[in-house]
Image (cartoon, rainbow, N blue to C red):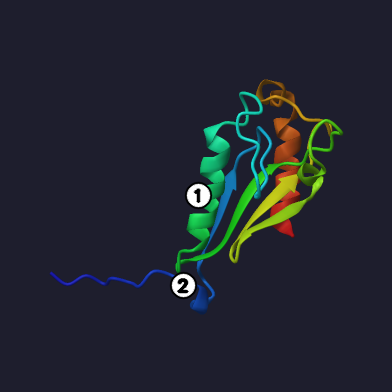
Amino acid sequence: MKTDRKEPPTVSTGNGLKITLLSLHGLIRVHEPELGRDSDTGGQTRYVLELAEELGRRDEVREVELITRQVIDRRVDAQYAQLEERIGEKARLVRIPFGPKRYLRKESLWPYLELFIDQALVHFRK
């Protein structure tokens, strides 16, 4: 049986995969993540960072974005206010502002998810 097997897309052909990961809750930063600060900064924080980094190493992947929420709050490190951090050569952390600027627990984010969608669409259209 003959199959028309195509090679996976590669960066060199310019049509590699663009992967977007969403992790809206907690405090996510590339260097020295604050694991265990509260119930929203546990293992998932580390997992999504590692996933973005590993996906960015794959030949068939052109770009990886890990999207999270921008936090501007004097009670947390100023790094969470930066709009972007580089994770690896093809991976980056993008912080999108939505809702109040201060840090919110995940249970408090629900009323602002439509704002996130609007802001994410603006980001994707750039």
Residue at x-position 77% and y-position 30%: 103
Q: What's the CA distance linking mark 1 and mark 2?
A: 19 Å
Q: Position of residue 28 (x, y in %)?
A: 66, 41
Residue under pointer 1: 51
- Circle 2 crowding by C-alpha within 10 Å: few under 14, some 14–19, many from 20: some
Locate the N terminus by quadrant.
Answer: bottom left
Is residue 72 left or right of 104 when viewed as pictured? right
Residue at x-position 54% and y-position 36%: 44
Amino acid at pointer 1: Leu
Which is nearer the eye, 82 or 121? 82
Residue under pointer 2: 10
Task: Say if 49 sits above or below 73 in the image.
Answer: below
Task: Say if 97 sits above or below 16 in the image.
Answer: above
Amino acid at pointer 2: Thr
Decide which of tag 1 and tag 2 comes sooner along the chain.
2
Task: Say if 58 sits above or below 75 in the image.
Answer: below
Q: Based on the displayed image, in which of its 4 quarters is residue 107 positioned?
A: top right
Give the total number of marks visible in the rendering. Answer: 2
Residue at x-position 78% and y-position 46%: 79
